[in-house]
């Protein structure tokens, strides 16, 4: 199966606030919470089947 065998048919992006259990010093900044970007992706395969998956990553300090 190659990447050409699937087609993205839907994506949903969420920004999730996440408070930290303890403050984290990051350079000159003290972080007490972060924001995570979470995506839900739906794909369609060549056979007509669909599949869903999730991915998430923390967003860094600007």
Image (cartoon, rainbow, N blue to C red):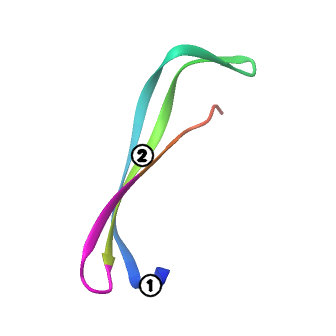
Q: Estimate the x, y position of residue 56 in percent, counting from the top left.
A: 46, 46
Q: Nearer the viewer, residue 42 or 22?
A: 22
Magenta-span inclusion, residue 47: yes
Q: Is the C-beta separation of discs 2 and 1 under 8 Å?
A: no
Q: Main secondary structure of the magenta part?
A: strand
Helix, strand or loop for disc 2: strand
Q: Nearer the viewer, mark 2 or mark 1?
A: 1
Judge from the rendering whether residue 53 lies leftward or rightward of residue 49; answer left or right.
Answer: right
Q: Estimate the x, y position of residue 59 in percent, counting from the top left.
A: 56, 38
Helix, strand or loop for disc 1: loop
The image shows a total of numbered marks equal to 2
Judge from the rendering whether residue 54 lies leftward or rightward of residue 60; answer left or right.
Answer: left
Residue for badge 1 = 1
Q: Nearer the viewer, residue 36 or 2?
A: 2
Residue 38 is labelled as: 2
Q: Residue at 42% x, 46% y: name it.
A: 38
Where, by quadrant of the figure, is residue 7 drawn?
bottom left
Q: Crowding near pointer 1: few (<14 within 10 Å), some, many (20+)?
A: few
The span picked out in magenta is 45-54
Relative to 6, residue 59 above or below: above
The quarter of the image holding the N terminus is bottom left
Earlier residue among tags 2 and 1? 1
């Amino acid at each position: 199966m190659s990447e050409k065998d699937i087609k993205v048919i839907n994506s949903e992006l969420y920004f999730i606030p996440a408070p930290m259990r303890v403050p984290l010093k990051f350079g000159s900044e003290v972080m007490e919470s972060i924001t995570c970007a979470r995506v839900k992706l739906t794909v369609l395969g060549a056979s007509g089947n669909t599949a869903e998956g999730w991915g998430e990553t923390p967003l860094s300090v600007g």
